[in-house]
């Protein structure tokens, strides 16, 4: 019969025996395990790429909707911008075929830009060349021809020469030839008028609806073009003066245009007192003549237009300018600034963001936004945002338990007692002696557990396409570039101090055998975990990965009290899973989040541009 | 130094290999697998000798975890220890599932479970494996965890979803059974 100590020794022997025999046991697995694993890893890689097609299609969708929006605008007969009177006037000219009819005292060649039905021919008797040019340009494809010409004028830098040569060759001595102060003026004797008309036409023709603001920037235009309906009549007037040649203006009008609307034109004419150019309202109905739009050309055309008007007032100076003009210099800088400033909107937003579930972080949000109007309905918006995100601690699996024993053990020994020991072997009872030893000792128990969470800063830059449903309400969507970091895993240490442990052991021996020595305290007192000197650092690696992620954002914005904005949106970013202790610690990053913000438009921020 | 680490000339070579694996180099992954899978398979076999399908399944799971979590290895501590932990965790997941489904502690005693040997030194791996695998599932798991993985009863209890005293009982019973077969 074995006593308890011997049994323990034997236990240890058995443990050691197997540990020694099998502890370093290795076996090469069959090759099919690797084959299966390889397939599995392949599958995982495919899965990983899932996000990218999704992202690309979203990007594509954004651009398509952008393009779609632009074409939709172009295809519309009636530009959406009819709210602005000026815009309306000019925009309407897109559909207009203008018929400049000029009456001059000096028998100047009449520059008739166009009429779809050749009205010009019936009304005026221009010089042959001019007429030819006019006809060529205008007879059949009124709008296209004009636009081409206008574009040409614009592209060529709107120099007098170019324009002049078209309708009036310098060789054609204008009948109203008066003294010219500059060579430029000479070239423009007729040419100026031709040019200005052309320029007017250009301005009138090629301005796309989307460019209405361009013309807002040019107050002169207001007086020159008035329209109301889709069927339009354009009337262009040209005046030539004995001592100065001027192009006055082209007024594009609609069917019911009232002459009073081109008063400004009259005024200009009146200044050039020798010539009275009468605006003639010719009723020409042209349907669906949509000028192709070349924004760059239109801008130049506008400048040409403006200059030509100015030339009407002060020809001498302007002629010089125009002659010297290079194409890129032809657009006044102030006009560009004004145009850009008018289309820009900026503001700030602040609010709160969160998601559903315990894994969702709570975030305070502060944004700045900059919006550029592409058309009356569409705008591009960038909204750089900084967020302070807080995630309450989420415990993950895994802990380390250590003990720190104190050297304060006590032991007591109870008297020997004979007992029956029942073993499970063959259901036999064996008699023996028991000696009970009781040990007590205090120790500290140290438990290291792990949780992720905490506070981080997130930065994001959404690029959004915004669509105005009404004056106040707009919706937007787009891609989001997010920069943040993984929530760190923190090691939490719980220490319970001075825990008293009592353990006893019974030493057994068979009758007639000598009693064995008392066991040691350390062999009896057992603690959970390992001794604290075995601590080798946290169970999980430090998580300090900065992440650049992509996502989407969808939302709407409601404007109230002129400058205030209420926004609600959802956004979600991709995040590669990062499983630690059976929990995906990147889950809080990949969740959809919902945000409400209050915003304020900063009106004057770009005032200096104006 | 372990067998696997001996095959690599130094720590830096291991780092390179690990980084290549993180970069999804299939060759590097194969190399890592070739280095560490025998030891891993050896551990697994101690728990599930005689059930090759299950053992291979566990090995597959374990290495899949290793490759997908490799970027989380902090280069602190022995790499083999890290792998071992993942292998044992995977094994435990497996055992928990299967032991739960089979709580009746049936005794598995293959014909050759009785070993008449004078010294364990003379016993082959196979004989020892057969002996260990002659234990009922739960006892085998407890014995393995306690003896080879040096887990405490409390940890074993958590791992296997049993209580601590059960764990003690299973260990002692396992020892008793093994003793019987050795001393016979």
Image (tube, helix red, strand yellow):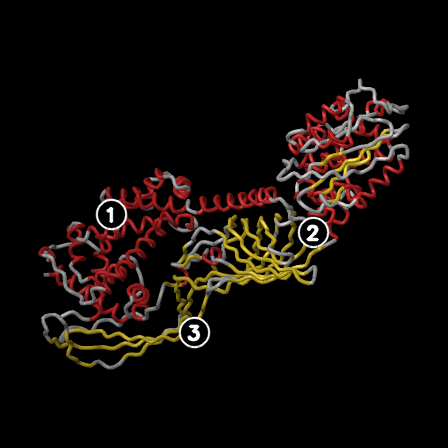
The disc, 1 or 2, on the residue closer to the chain's N-terminal end is 1
Discs 1 and 3 carry the same chain letter: yes
**According to the image, label 3 marks what residue?**
A498
Q: Tell me: B124 left or right of B161.
A: left
Q: Say which of marks 1 and 2 sits in front.
A: 2
Sequence-wise, the earlier of marks 1 and 3 is 1
Chain under callout 2: A
Q: Chain of mark 3?
A: A
How busy is the neighbourhood of tag 3: few (under 14 within 10 Å), some, or many (20 plus)? Answer: some
- Say above or below: B124 vs A568: above
SS for tag 2? Answer: loop
**Would you say A576 lies left or right of A120 here?**
left
Q: Are marks 1 and 2 in contact (CB under 8 Å)?
A: no
Residue A26: which numbered mark, if any? 1
Indicate the secondary structure of the residue bearing disc 3: strand
Q: Position of residue A467 (x, y in %)?
A: 59, 51
The N terminus of chain A lies in quadrant: bottom left
Where disc 1 sits, the SS reads loop
Q: Position of residue A583 (x, y in %)?
A: 41, 59
In terms of image quadrants, where is residue B110? bottom left
Query: Disc 3 vs disc 2: which is toward the camera?
Result: 2
- Is residue A243 or residue A555 the one in the foreground? A243
* Structural distance between the alpha carbons of marks 3 and 2: 83 Å
Q: Nearer the viewer, mark 1 or mark 3?
A: 1
Extreme residue toward the front, this view: A122
The CA distance from mark 1 to mark 2 is 84 Å
Pointer 1 indicates a residue of which chain? A
Residue corresponding to mark 2? A83
Q: Nearer the viewer, residue B107 or A16?
A: B107
Q: Is residue B16 left or right of residue A479?
A: left
């Amino acid at each position: 019969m074995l006593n308890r100590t011997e049994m323990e020794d034997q236990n240890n022997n058995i443990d050691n025996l197997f540990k020694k025999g099998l502890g370093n046991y290795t076996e090469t697995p069959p090759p099919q395990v690797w084959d299966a694993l390889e397939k599995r890893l392949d599958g995982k890689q495919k899965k990983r790429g899932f996000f990218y097609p999704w992202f690309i299609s979203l990007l594509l969708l954004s651009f398509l909707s952008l393009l779609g929006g632009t074409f939709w605008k172009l295809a519309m007969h009636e530009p959406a911008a009819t709210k602005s009177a000026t815009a309306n006037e000019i925009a309407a000219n897109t559909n207009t075929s203008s018929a400049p009819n000029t009456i001059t005292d000096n028998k100047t060649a009449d520059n008739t830009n166009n009429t779809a039905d050749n009205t010009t021919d019936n009304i005026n008797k221009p010089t042959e060349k001019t007429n030819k040019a006019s006809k060529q340009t205008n007879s059949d494809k009124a709008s296209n021809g004009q636009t081409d010409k206008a574009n040409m004028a614009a592209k060529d830098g709107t120099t007098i020469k170019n324009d002049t040569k078209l309708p009036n060759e310098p060789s054609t001595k204008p009948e109203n030839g008066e003294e010219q102060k500059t060579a430029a003026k000479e070239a423009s004797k007729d040419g100026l008028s031709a040019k200005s008309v052309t320029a007017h036409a250009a301005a009138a023709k090629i301005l796309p609806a989307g460019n209405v603001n361009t013309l807002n920037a040019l107050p002169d235009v207001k007086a020159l073009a008035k329209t109301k309906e889709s069927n339009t009549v354009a009337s262009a007037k040209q005046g030539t003066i004995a001592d100065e040649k001027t192009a006055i203006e082209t007024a594009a009008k609609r069917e019911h245009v009232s002459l009073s609307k081109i008063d400004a034109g009259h005024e200009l004419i009146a200044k050039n007192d020798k010539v009275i150019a009468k605006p003639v309202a010719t009723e020409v109905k042209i349907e669906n003549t949509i000028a192709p739009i070349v924004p760059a050309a239109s801008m130049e055309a506008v400048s040409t237009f403006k200059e030509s008007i100015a030339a009407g007032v002060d020809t001498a100076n302007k002629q010089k300018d125009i002659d010297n003009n290079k194409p890129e210099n032809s657009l006044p800088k102030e006009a560009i600034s004004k145009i850009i400033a008018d289309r820009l909107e900026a503001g700030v937003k602040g609010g709160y963001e969160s998601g559903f579930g315990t894994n969702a972080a709570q975030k305070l949000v502060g944004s700045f936004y900059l919006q550029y109007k592409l058309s009356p309905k569409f705008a591009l918006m960038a909204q750089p945002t900084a967020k302070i995100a807080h995630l309450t601690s989420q415990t993950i699996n895994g802990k380390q338990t250590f003990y720190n024993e104190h050297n304060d053990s006590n032991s007591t020994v109870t008297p020997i007692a004979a007992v029956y020991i029942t073993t499970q072997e063959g259901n036999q009872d064996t008699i023996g002696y028991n000696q009970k030893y009781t040990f007590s000792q205090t120790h500290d128990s140290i438990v290291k557990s792990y949780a992720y969470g905490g506070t981080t800063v997130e930065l994001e830059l959404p690029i959004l396409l915004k669509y105005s449903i009404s004056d106040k309400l707009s919706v937007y969507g787009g891609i989001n570039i997010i920069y943040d970091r993984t929530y760190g895993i923190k090691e939490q240490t719980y220490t319970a101090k001075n825990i008293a442990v009592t353990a006893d052991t019974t030493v057994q021996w068979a009758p007639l055998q000598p009693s064995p020595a008392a066991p040691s305290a350390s062999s009896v007192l057992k603690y959970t975990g390992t001794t604290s000197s075995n601590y080798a650092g946290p169970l999980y690696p430090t998580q300090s990965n900065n992440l650049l992620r992509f996502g989407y954002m969808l939302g709407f914005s409601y404007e109230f009290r002129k400058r205030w904005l209420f926004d609600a949106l959802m956004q979600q970013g991709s995040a590669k899973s990062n499983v630690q202790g059976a929990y995906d610690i990147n889950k809080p990053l990949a969740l959809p989040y919902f945000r409400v913000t209050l915003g304020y438009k900063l009106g004057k921020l770009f005032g200096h541009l104006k | 130094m372990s067998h696997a680490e001996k095959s690599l000339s130094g720590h830096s070579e291991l780092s390179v290999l690990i980084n290549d694996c993180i970069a999804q180099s299939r060759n590097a992954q194969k190399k890592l697998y070739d280095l560490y899978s025998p030891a891993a398979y050896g551990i697994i076999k101690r728990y599930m000798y005689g059930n090759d399908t299950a053992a291979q399944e566990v090995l597959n799971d374990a290495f899949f975890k290793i490759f997908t979590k490799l970027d989380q290895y902090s280069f602190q501590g022995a790499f083999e220890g890290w792998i071992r932990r993942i292998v044992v965790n995977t094994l435990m997941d497996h055992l928990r599932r299967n032991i739960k489904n089979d709580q009746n502690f049936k005794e598995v005693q293959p014909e050759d479970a009785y070993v008449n040997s004078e010294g364990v030194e003379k016993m082959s791996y196979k004989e020892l494996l057969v002996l260990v695998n002659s234990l009922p599932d739960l006892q085998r798991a407890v014995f393995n965890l306690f003896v080879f993985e040096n887990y405490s009863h409390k940890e074993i209890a958590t791992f296997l979803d049993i209580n601590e005293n059960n764990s003690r009982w299973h260990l002692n019973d396992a020892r008793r059974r093994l003793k019987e077969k050795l001393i016979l």
